[in-house]
Amino acid sequence: AKKLGGGNFSFFSEELRRELDYRKQLEQDIRTAIANKSFEVYFQPQVSLTSGKISGIEALVRWKHETRGMISPGEFIPVAEKCGFMPDIGRIVISKAIEEAAEWDRAGIDFGRIAVNVSGTELREPDFDAFLFGTLERAGLAPQKLSLEIVESVILDDEKTGIAAKLRHIRAAGVHLELDDFGTGYASLSHVNPNEIDRLKIDRRFVQNINENGDNTKIVRAITELARGLGISIVAEGAETEAELDSLMAIGCDQVQGYSIAFPMPQDKAREWLLARSP
Ligand code: C2E
Ligand code: CA
Ligand code: CA
Ligand code: CA
């Protein structure tokens, strides 16, 4: 039998070894999944709180691992970002999302806009805008039907990385830009500017239990009034209950996305959902 100290040491190094093996395996599996384009896209609707009409639908990456089952984006995206795989994954998701939206469009199914998440490493690829316009053109989808969800820290990225100019170019073509997870990052109000962005997404942490938490109600009301005053539209993320929907409606928030409306759905279910609500 090992001595206590030695045992502890080998316990920790075994944990570390297992963690490193897992990471290495995950990295290898991501590589294979990229080669096979086996990332899937789920879709979650965003609706107007006043009309009930669909205003947009967000594309969310899903990865069904052969042996481990569903691995959440929260788990594999950080690894993919670290290994430099995110631009490739993003392009698979963006292509699939745009192609699906183009099919809805041709079938006369109203979806508002297709919203895709774009990270800083994806945007920094020199040909990101060319890729985006090429994908839209091949699919036959108007740029006005696309929206990019970008977190504050990326929008705030300084001019010399070229991101700001690239975003202006993309927006000038008609693509909408949204500030994702608003309120959690580097909220510089100078970027809450209708000349730069079209919509704010209020982070779920402010929406949760909004009826029970006076502070959250005040925060969401203030953000909503700010956005309305500036002519920027606003969507509350992650509304899970009827009570949260009621509070958001009372505050006058434009739009909502969350489990109370619909879960993220695979493309056949999303199509059914949209069809059932198409006028
Ligand atoms: P996000 O952009 O803030 O997306 C919203 C997340 O909240 C999604 O998690 C969605 O499934 C979840 N959600 C929606 N409604 C509710 C609700 O009512 N309650 C709760 N508890 N959660 C709700 P998901 O799909 O696991 O994605 C996590 C994050 O991964 C996303 O956060 C986004 O930052 C990133 N992500 C997902 N897909 C992509 C992608 O294709 N590209 C990039 N770059 N990032 C992505
Ligand atoms: Ca998002
Ligand atoms: Ca978000
Ligand atoms: Ca988030």
Image: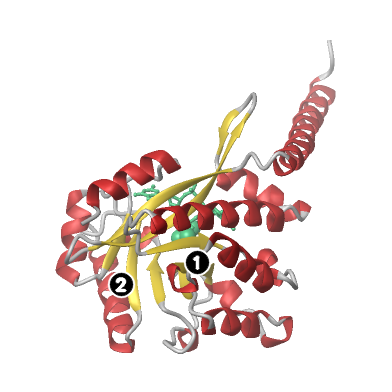
- Residue 64 falls left or right of residue 198: right
Looking at marks 2 and 1 on the same chain, the residue that comes earlier in the sequence is marked by 1
Task: Name which quarter of the figure residue 273 lies in.
Answer: top left
Nearer-the-camera pick, 125 or 203: 125
What is the CA distance from the residue labelled 2 to the residue labelled 1?
21 Å
Q: How is the image coloured?
A: secondary structure
Percent position of residue 147, x then y = 47, 68
> What amino acid is labelled 2 in the image?
Ile
Nearer-the-camera pick, 75 or 48: 48
Tell me if residue 263 can be seen. Answer: no
Nearer-the-camera pick, 42 or 249: 42
Which quarter of the rendered picture does the N terminus lie within?
Answer: top right
Label 1: how many Cα within 10 Å (few below 14, some 14–19, many 20+)? many
Tell me if residue 216 can be seen. Answer: yes
> What amino acid is labelled 1 in the image?
Glu
Label 2: how many Cα within 10 Å (few below 14, some 14–19, many 20+)? some
Mark 2 highlights which residue?
219
Mark 1 highlights which residue?
149
